[in-house]
Image (cartoon, rainbow, N blue to C red):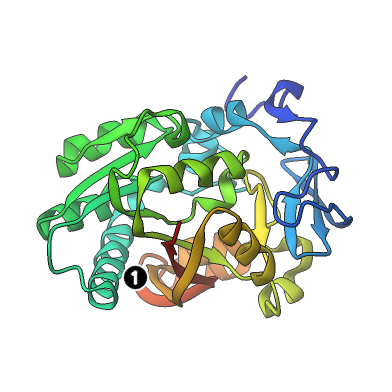
C-alpha cells in the first residue's frame, strides 16, 4: 500500500477484536463514543462501562508496521499532505525530544532513587534520546521498536542499541530488566494483554513498569474537542479511564506506586497541528515563534510508575 493509500486494506484489522471483547473487565458493555473521518475514511471508537475506550475493529500488527515506517507518520511535508496524521517533520523535533528525555530521566532518577546502575528497557524509544541520557548516567539501556528508521537513527546519532521488531515477539529473558519504560506507546498496542504479559515476564519482581497515558475521566480538553480530540484517530487502539487502567495492571500483577504530571517540551507547530488549529499555526509562523520550545503539561498526560508485585 502507498503511504497515502486509503482506505487501509481489510487485512490491517482484526475483525475478531471488536466490541465483543473488553480486556479490562472481561464483560463488554460498549457504546459508540465517536465516529471520525480521518483522511476521508471512517474510524469508530467505543467506550465500555468499565472505562476502557477502544477502536473497533482493532488495527493489527500489519497496520503498525506500515504506519510507523511511512511518510504519513514521519512527515506530512514529505507526503505532500494538507492534513497531518503523525508529524509535520519528525526529525526536526529532535531538540524537543532530547530536552523532554533529560527532564523525565532526572525526575525518575530522583523519585525512584536510581543510585546504582539499572537494566533499562524502553519500548518504542523513538530516536533513542532517553536511552542516550540513561546510558550517559551509567545505566544499561536497550530499546525495541518496529521502525527501522529509529533503529538506524539511534545507532548513528546516539550510539545506542534499539532492537528491531515487536517487543512481545523478542526472546528477552525472564526478569532481564529492572525498569521497563514506554512513552506515547501504550495507546498504540493492539494486542495489549499479550504485550503487558511480556512486560511482566521480562521485568524483575519489584521492578518498575513506567509509562505515560492520557487520563480520559474528567478530561476537559476531550470534552471540549469531542471527536476532534487527538486520541480519536488511528493508530490509537486504546484510551483509559483510571478504573479500567487499574484493573488491567492488577490483572497482570502490578500495583501503582506513584503518578505525576508528564511535562514535556513542545513548540507551537506541534501543538497547533495536534489540535488542528490551522489559524494558530499560521499566526505562529507569521510571528516566527512556531519552533520555540517550552515545557508544558500536554494533552494532558500522566506518568504512572507501577511495581511488579508477583
Is residue 64 toward the left or the right of residue 154 in the image?
right
Q: Quadrant of the N terminus?
A: top right
Is residue 91 visible in the rendered structure shown here?
no
Q: Which residue is mark 1?
A: 293
Q: Eyeballing the image, is 53 above or below 72?
A: below
Residue 196 appears in the figure: yes
- On the image, which quarter does residue 173 sit in? top left
Residue visible at 36% across and 75% down?
A: 294
Estimate the x, y position of residue 242 in percent, counting from the top left: 64, 71
Percent across and percent down for residue 165 are 41, 29
Q: Quadrant of residue 107?
A: bottom left
Identity of the residue drawn at 51% across and 40% down: 73
Q: Quadrant of residue 118?
A: bottom left
Looking at the image, is 86 positioned above or below residue 64?
Answer: below
Q: Nearer the viewer, residue 162 or 227?
A: 162
Q: Nearer the viewer, residue 236 or 108?
A: 108
Going 75% across and 65% down the picture, which residue do you hit? 51
Toward the front, the furthest residue is 310
User: Where 50 sits versus 297, above or below?
Assistant: above
In this rendering, the answer to whether 45 lies above or below 309 is: above
Residue 223, position as x, y percentages in the image: 75, 75
Residue 10 place in picture, x, y as percent? 76, 23
**How would you rate the neighbour count of disc 1 (Cα within 10 Å): few for under 14, some for 14-19, many for 20 or more?**
some
The image quadrant where one finds the C terminus is bottom left
Amino acid at each position: 500500500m502507498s503511504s497515502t493509500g486509503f482506505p487501509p486494506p481489510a487485512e490491517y484489522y482484526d475483525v475478531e477484536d471488536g466490541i465483543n471483547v473488553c480486556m479490562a473487565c472481561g464483560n463488554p458493555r460498549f457504546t459508540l463514543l465517536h465516529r471520525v473521518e480521518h483522511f476521508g475514511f471512517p474510524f469508530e471508537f467505543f467506550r465500555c462501562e468499565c472505562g476502557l475506550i477502544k477502536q473497533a475493529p482493532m488495527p493489527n500488527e500489519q497496520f503498525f508496521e506500515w504506519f510507523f515506517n511511512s511518510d504519513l507518520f514521519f512527515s506530512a511535508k514529505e507526503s505532500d499532505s494538507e492534513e497531518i496524521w503523525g508529524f509535520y517533520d519528525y526529525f526536526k523535533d529532535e531538540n524537543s525530544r532530547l530536552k523532554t528525555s533529560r527532564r523525565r530521566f532526572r525526575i525518575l532518577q530522583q523519585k525512584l532513587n536510581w543510585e546504582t546502575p539499572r537494566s533499562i528497557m524502553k519500548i518504542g524509544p523513538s530516536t533513542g534520546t532517553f536511552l542516550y541520557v540513561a546510558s550517559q548516567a551509567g545505566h544499561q539501556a536497550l530499546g525495541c521498536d518496529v521502525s527501522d528508521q529509529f533503529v538506524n537513527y539511534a545507532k548513528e546519532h546516539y550510539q545506542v542499541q534499539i532492537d528491531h521488531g515487536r517487543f512481545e515477539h523478542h526472546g528477552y529473558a525472564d526478569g532481564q530488566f529492572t525498569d521497563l519504560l514506554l512513552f506515547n506507546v501504550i495507546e498504540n498496542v493492539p494486542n495489549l494483554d499479550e504485550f503487558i504479559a511480556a512486560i511482566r515476564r521480562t521485568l524483575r519482581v519489584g521492578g518498575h513498569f513506567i509509562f505515560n497515558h492520557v487520563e480520559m475521566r474528567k478530561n476537559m480538553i476531550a470534552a471540549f474537542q469531542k471527536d476532534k480530540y487527538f486520541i480519536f484517530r488511528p493508530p490509537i487502539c486504546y484510551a483509559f479511564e483510571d478504573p479500567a487502567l487499574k484493573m488491567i495492571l492488577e490483572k497482570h500483577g502490578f500495583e501503582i506506586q506513584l503518578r505525576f504530571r508528564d511535562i514535556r517540551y513542545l513548540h507551537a507547530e506541534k501543538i497547533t497541528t495536534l489540535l488542528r488549529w490551522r489559524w494558530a499555526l499560521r499566526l505562529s509562523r507569521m510571528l516566527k515563534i512556531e519552533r520555540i520550545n517550552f515545557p508544558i503539561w500536554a494533552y494532558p498526560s500522566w506518568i504512572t510508575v507501577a511495581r511488579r508485585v508477583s
